[in-house]
Amino acid sequence: MTAQRSIHAPDWLTARPIAHRGLHSGEKGIVENTLAAARAAIAENYAIECDIQLTRDGEAMVFHDDTLDRLTRAQGRLDALDAHEIGKITYQECGETITSLADFLSAVAGRVPVIVELKGNFDGDLRLAERALTLAAAYPGPIALKSFDPEPMAYLRATGVTCPLGLVAEAVYIGKYWAALSDEQRAALTDWRDYPRVEPDFLSWNAADLPHAVPLLCRRGIGMPVMTWTVRSESERARVAPWVDQIVFEGFTP
């Protein structure tokens, strides 16, 4: 890692536990990444992590998966539809529809921090980053942007965006989720060669890969805040506590 400018990591970024995709609960019928999940997190004073996907017409929707099948009453890829079509799709477990990031942020209204993860296909498409930048710049509350993909984050850094930017990372990039990556892309993620272009303000690291040299060097070497995902119990929280500044959690209330 090379020397970088001063890290822009405000205290709010790690001041409170971060509800993974909002404070969702199967028992309560609260689905991940919905307005109900956001309201539940706000009620408990947790920060919120949410995911965004790009629609066919360039809108950012709050949704984790590439496809609609797992959670909704529709099927197929989300990016094959326009925003107004997606906005009519309801979740299987509740009557809510998929919301845009604009409406999600309007509902949160700055009451708790929002950490937005940009999803994508590692294909160089910067439209989601552009839309996130527009919304983050206009949002009056605490907001941060992060992604596994260094390309949109490097783009955002080059724009001079003022909100914190982070990289999501883990120790190795193997398995079904990473099957589409080239060997070169996988190597670049593993050895952090895009760090100088992104100059991240924080790291979001896989809890299963703790302890590890990368988050240790970030945190102790250059003072970069480290959050970890996804912590699902108090025992797991205790295990990772020495290595991180905050947790992204689900399935329990820390």
Image (tube, grey):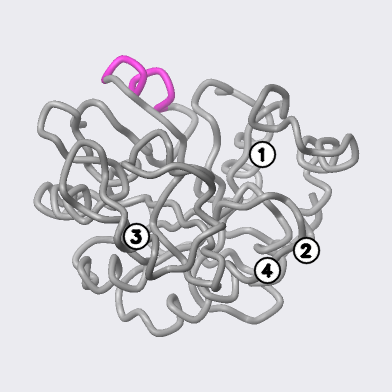
Give the CA distance from mark 1 to mark 4: 29 Å
Q: Secondary structure at mark 2?
A: helix
The secondary structure that most of the magenta stretch takes on is helix
Residue on which the image places disc 1: 217
Residue 252 magenta: no
Question: Residue 81 location in percent, x, y?
Answer: 50, 61
Q: Secondary structure at mark 3?
A: strand
Give the CA distance from mark 3 to mark 4: 21 Å
Circles 2 and 4, Cβ within 8 Å, touching? The answer is no
Say which amino acid is labelled 3.
Answer: Val
Say which amino acid is labelled 2.
Answer: Arg
Q: Earlier in the sequence, mark 1 or mark 4?
A: 4
Density class for disc 1 (Cα within 10 Å; few <14, some 14-19, many ≥20) is few
Lateral position of residue 215 relative to residue 253, left or right: right
Give the CA distance from mark 3 to mark 1: 26 Å
Q: Earlier in the sequence, mark 2 or mark 4?
A: 4
Q: Earlier in the sequence, mark 3 or mark 1?
A: 3
Residue on which the image places disc 3: 114
**Residue displayed at 66% across by 81% down:** 159
Circles 3 and 4, Cβ within 8 Å, touching? The answer is no
Say which amino acid is labelled 1.
Answer: Leu
Give the CA distance from mark 2 to mark 3: 24 Å
Q: Secondary structure at mark 1?
A: helix
Q: Earlier in the sequence, mark 3 or mark 4?
A: 3
Density class for disc 2 (Cα within 10 Å; few <14, some 14-19, many ≥20) is some
Q: Quadrant of residue 115?
A: bottom left
Density class for disc 4 (Cα within 10 Å; few <14, some 14-19, many ≥20) is some
Q: Quadrant of the C terminus?
A: top left
Magenta range is: 234-241
- Numbered tag placed on residue 126 in the rendering: 4
- Numbered tag placed on residue 197 in the rendering: 2
